[in-house]
Image: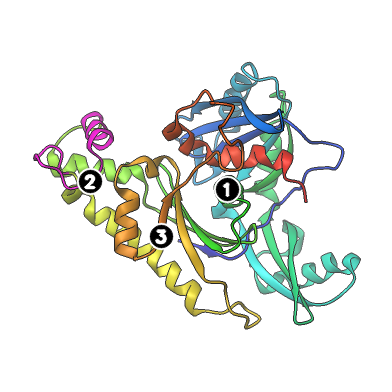
Amino acid sequence: MKDRENVSKIFPTPSFLGGNSLGVDISDKSVKYASLSPENGELILNYHGREDIPDGIVERGEIQDPEKLKEIFRKIKKKVKNEYIRAALPEEKLYLFNLSLPKMQNEEVRDAIALSLEQYVPITNVDVIFDFDFIEEKNGEMHFQVGVIPKDIIDSYLSLFEGTGFTPISFEIEAQSIARAVIPKTETGAVMVVDMGETRTGISIAYKGFVLFTSTVEIGSVHLDQAIMKHFNIDEKEAKRRKEKYGIRQGMSEESNLLSAVVDTLTALRDEVNKHYIFWGSHPFDNGSERPKIEKMIMCGGGSNLSGVTDFMSESLKMIVEKANPWVNVNSMKRYIPDMQRDDSMAYTTSFGLALADYDHD
């Protein structure tokens, strides 16, 4: 497991582009995509969909078979009119950190950050690409979030879209996209976001719109399925059926009593979340300043649809835990009902967040 601090977009959107790009979330198992369009002062869902990725094509975010992945994107292109793509980068390959510098002119910042990279990244400067965001100026210092990624990873994602009909206009890490989607713009405190996916869970902490900490835990909804299968000696299809029907609350019948089957897996996830919560609250930033207190936790991702999981986390962590609303920064839903069920939309938080960047300029 890698811990990383401070997430930054790697390629920002050129100023001459914008509006109605396709947000693309590439995982080891699937490609999920969505685009948004303005209508009557709000945003509506334009396109959305999912294409499964066969095993071996993408492994831990690294593209192993680009030609087969290109075929999937050509298939998607036949379904959408969007030309431009915003894509999420694999967090496992990124180096992200917070950096404080003495106050200086804006044109001096990039060179100053470049000179500091070797302190945080075990790769030579010529082999990486970096980008940064200004967080705030405090006590005579300028505070930045810096994102660094190996050039070969960027090259693999850039070349992926060649010949597919798509043009990538920005890349950023998944946690930043999710934060843009699920944290209300009115939120001013620090928020922990727990994104429970199929094979792993992302844990991040955001403050003032910036993700300041991320980590990945190798526990996902598939591990809950496996625990249920083993406990009841049933196949995967039946395990998924019971999980969706009963959730994890203590059931009245043997079939519905899933808590005893998954408690060890959920406890392991809870312990990882708690470890990062404690670390955040007990360690200052590198410059010695105190970290903002975490006000609440938001759960998202397909695994968060499991009935009872937010209650389990809230009760065991003794903190406010909410199920994410992926539409909170998209549409009020007063005049528009999207063609997507609420639970289904939980799996599209990354895609929504990427698409929202069209309308959330710096």
Number of numbered discs overlaid on the protein picture: 3
Pointer 2 with pointer 1, Cβ within 8 A = no
> Pointer 2: what residue?
227
Q: Residue 179, how many percent across, how many down?
A: 58, 51
Secondary structure found at label 3: loop
Q: Distance between the Cα atoms at labels 3 and 2?
A: 27 Å
Which amino acid does the dot numbered 1 rest on? Glu
Residue at 59% in and 38% down? 352
Identify the disc placed on residue 174.
Answer: 1
The answer to whether one can see residue 28 in this image is: yes
Would residue 111 be counted in the magenta stretch? no
Q: Which residues are magenta?
A: 237-257
Picture quadrant where residue 330 is located: top right
Element on which disc 1 rests = helix
Above-or-below relation of 195 to 55: below
- Residue linked to disc 3: 320
Kind of residue indicated by mark 2 = Ala
Q: Please tell me which residue lies in front, 33 or 90.
A: 33
Q: Could you say whether the residue bearing mark 2 is in a helix, strand or loop? A: helix
- Indicate whether 213 appears above or below 252: below
Q: What residue appears at the point 56 percent right and 51 percent down from the top-left corner?
A: 183
- The residue that appears at 43% across and 44% down in the rendered structure is 197
